[in-house]
Image (tube, rainbow, N blue to C red):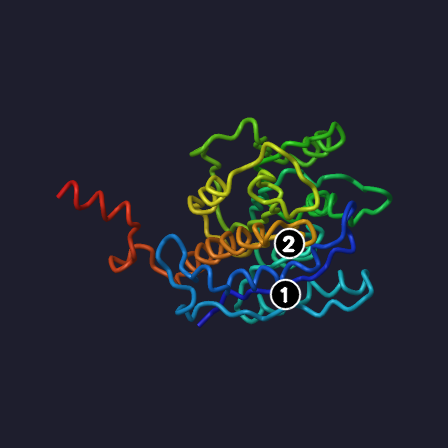
């Protein structure tokens, strides 16, 4: 059976402010498998009993930043060639560039949905064209995706606004977003989630605190209402060094479960129309009240 593969990318050499996201993948897994929660998605899928995914652990990226960065794209390509789509745990957001390069070679009509406080469209930052502030500039200038849709943006500089106009990026700023906003997404879809899309009150464990972001509930709602088939995803920029009592690790694990469930749904490995699917407690209560 085709799989969805979880793959850790412990890399933060292109971070511009603080290091620490390289420590994230094992901390997210620790939260995912902790005894304080379970492996069920909110749709009722028990990931612990699902054969549709596997965990390949963390990619060995060595100590040299250039060599480490160059290893990511072929690692993703290898898994795609084997029929396995990837859900990657960063790492800083620079890892999205080599991941998307691999995906674009397989899916020429790829749409990219980025949930983020920052557009990451700088041509360069501090002399580094591969900074975590630049991956989507590299992706767009190479024409790797058909559409780039950014949601949650609240730090748009004049330079990045010019870059967005140049590349035809579709931006939904945080102040313009509202629950239920239609994004008109069509597949195949790659989903890139920077955890600083969340307000720092919900995710303090990120390097760049940007107030005014999503609640955890709102972010989950966006993921759960995606209609297009999600063929790949990443969850990046968790920084354990800044976390408070593993609060952000648990948020990352929660987001991981919902994204994984969505990817399994897209691959036909999980039928959300199954009548045996677990309904929420509130849906059951409503049934009792109305029948």
> Which residue is the site of mark 1?
77
Return the residue found at the far right: 127
In this view, the residue in front, 143 or 92, is: 92
> Which residue is the site of mark 2?
100
Residue 214 rendering spot, x and y as whole percentages: 54, 37
Quadrant of the image containing the C terminus: top left
* Element assignment for label 2: helix
* Element assignment for label 1: helix
Quadrant of the image containing the N terminus: bottom left
In this view, the residue in front, 285 or 95, is: 285
If you read the primary sequence from the N terminus, does the residue marked by circle 2 or circle 1 appear first? 1
Residue 98 rendering spot, x and y as whole percentages: 69, 57
Q: Quadrant of residue 270?
A: bottom left
14 relative to 3, above or below = above
Residue 192 rendering spot, x and y as whole percentages: 59, 49
In this view, the residue in front, 39 or 172, is: 39
């Amino acid at each position: 059976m085709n799989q969805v593969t979880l793959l850790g990318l412990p890399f933060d050499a292109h971070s511009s402010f603080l290091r620490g996201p390289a420590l994230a993948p094992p901390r997210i897994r620790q939260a995912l498998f902790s005894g304080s929660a379970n492996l069920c998605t909110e749709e009722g899928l028990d990931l612990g009993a699902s054969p549709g995914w596997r965990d390949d652990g963390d990619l060995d990226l060595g100590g040299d930043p250039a060599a480490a960065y160059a290893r990511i794209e072929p690692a993703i390509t290898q898994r795609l060639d084997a029929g396995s789509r990837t859900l990657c745990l960063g790492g800083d957001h620079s890892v999205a560039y080599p991941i998307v390069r691999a995906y674009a070679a397989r899916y020429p009509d790829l749409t990219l949905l980025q949930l983020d406080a920052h557009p990451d469209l700088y041509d360069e930052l501090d002399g580094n064209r591969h900074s975590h502030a630049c991956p989507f500039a590299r992706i767009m200038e190479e024409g790797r995706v058909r559409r780039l849709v950014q949601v949650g943006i609240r730090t748009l500089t004049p330079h990045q606004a010019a870059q967005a106009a140049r590349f035809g990026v579709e931006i939904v700023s945080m102040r313009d977003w509202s629950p239920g906003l239609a994004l008109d997404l069509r597949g195949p879809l790659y989903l890139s989630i920077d955890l600083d899309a969340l307000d720092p009150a919900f995710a303090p464990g990120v390097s760049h605190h940007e107030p005014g972001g999503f609640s955890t509930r709102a972010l989950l709602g966006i993921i759960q209402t995606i209609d297009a088939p999600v063929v790949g995803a990443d969850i990046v920029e968790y920084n354990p060094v800044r976390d408070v009592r593993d609060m952000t690790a648990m948020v990352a694990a929660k987001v991981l479960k919902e994204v994984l469930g969505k990817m399994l749904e897209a691959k036909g490995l999980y039928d959300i129309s199954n009548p045996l699917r677990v309904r929420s407690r509130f849906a059951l209560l409503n049934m009792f009240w109305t029948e």
